[in-house]
Amino acid sequence: MIYGTPADEAAKGAVEIEVNGRDYTLTGCVGSAPVRGYYLEGNEANDTGEPQGFLVNQPSDAVTEPHYHETNQFQVFVGGSGRFGKFDVAPLSVQYANGHSPYGPIVSGPEGIDYFTLRARWDPGAKYMPASRDKLIKGNQRQRLAPNIKVSSSEELARRFGAEFEIVIDAEGDGLVAYIGRFGPKATVCVPVARNSGGQYWVVVNGTMSHEGDGRTFPRLSCLFATADHPPTLVTAGDEGMEMLVLQFPEKNFVGMATEPVE
């Protein structure tokens, strides 16, 4: 199954939520976006059973404090500038974190920072550190960061013929991998999803794309989620070409995989 909505349609449902006293804008792209900026005890009862992908517009000079989530996730920085932990981040950067892997802070620059938060399954909310240290399960922490991924100019895309792929996060034995596809005008490629994975997101970062079985056009900043059992799918670039991130999750979610709580 493939979930997803073109960016222009998704933008109509954008909402504001409060995060640490500031108003952030969330645009739901896949499944249901969070309705608050923190974990509320018992929120697990609201699990939709669907993947969860949304675009965050973090306002200028705002701080998302260090925290973790129960589920694995990718984050893709697509606009503005800021700092992620000790690292400067700007478009295009990709971060991956296993569930129960604390990260942050995310500090936005003077023009704010925009990023996708992408999960293969619903999450009950951010657990901030150190207040939620007693809920953190250790033993499967993992993070990866791929900064400064090149995005082509319109002239470079127009000169491309066919498609090529560039790894941005190296493949690991449990299915984790991330790469970017660079498509020339109207190029078509079959994109497979590994069966030994947790599915994958496709994020359009340049140009437009379409895929077989769906007559819609997906412009820049559209994202889709393909489940691990979905058959290989033909993806086609628009007249101007296209660049698309493919972000594949590990087979297991790593929630509750360890038994030893942090002391």
Image (spheres, rainbow, N blue to C red):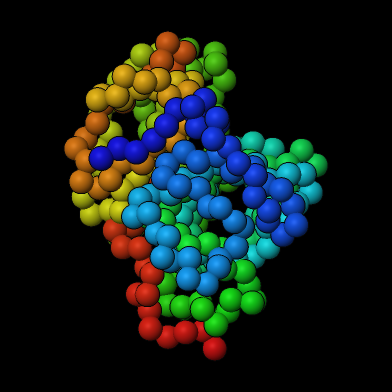
In the displayed structure, 91 sits above or below 241; it is: below
> In this orientation, which residue lies closer to the viewer: 167 or 249?
249
> In this orientation, which residue lies closer to the viewer: 220 or 243?
220
Residue found 48% across the figure and 71% down from its top:
42
Residue found 34% across the figure and 38% down from its top:
3
Spot occupied by residue 204 in the image (x, y as percentages of width and height): 46, 30
Residue 184 appears in the rendering = no
Judge from the rendering whether residue 27 lies leftward or rightward of residue 131; answer left or right: left
Judge from the rendering whether residue 138 lies leftward or rightward of residue 85; answer left or right: left
Residue found 28% across the figure and 45% down from its top:
227
Judge from the rendering whether residue 106 lies leftward or rightward of residue 2; answer left or right: right
Spot occupied by residue 54 in the image (x, y as percentages of width and height): 51, 43
Residue 222 appears in the rendering = yes
Judge from the rendering whether residue 105 lies leftward or rightward of residue 50; answer left or right: right
Task: Name the quadrant of the N terminus.
Answer: top left
Residue found 55% across the figure and 39% down from its top:
27
> In this orientation, which residue lies closer to the viewer: 57 or 38?
38
Spot occupied by residue 26 in the image (x, y as percentages of width and height): 59, 43
Given the current orientation, which residue lies at the most extreme bottom position?
Answer: 263
Q: Image quarter for residue 174?
A: bottom left
Task: Name the quadrant of the C terminus.
Answer: bottom right
Q: Image quarter for residue 40?
A: bottom right
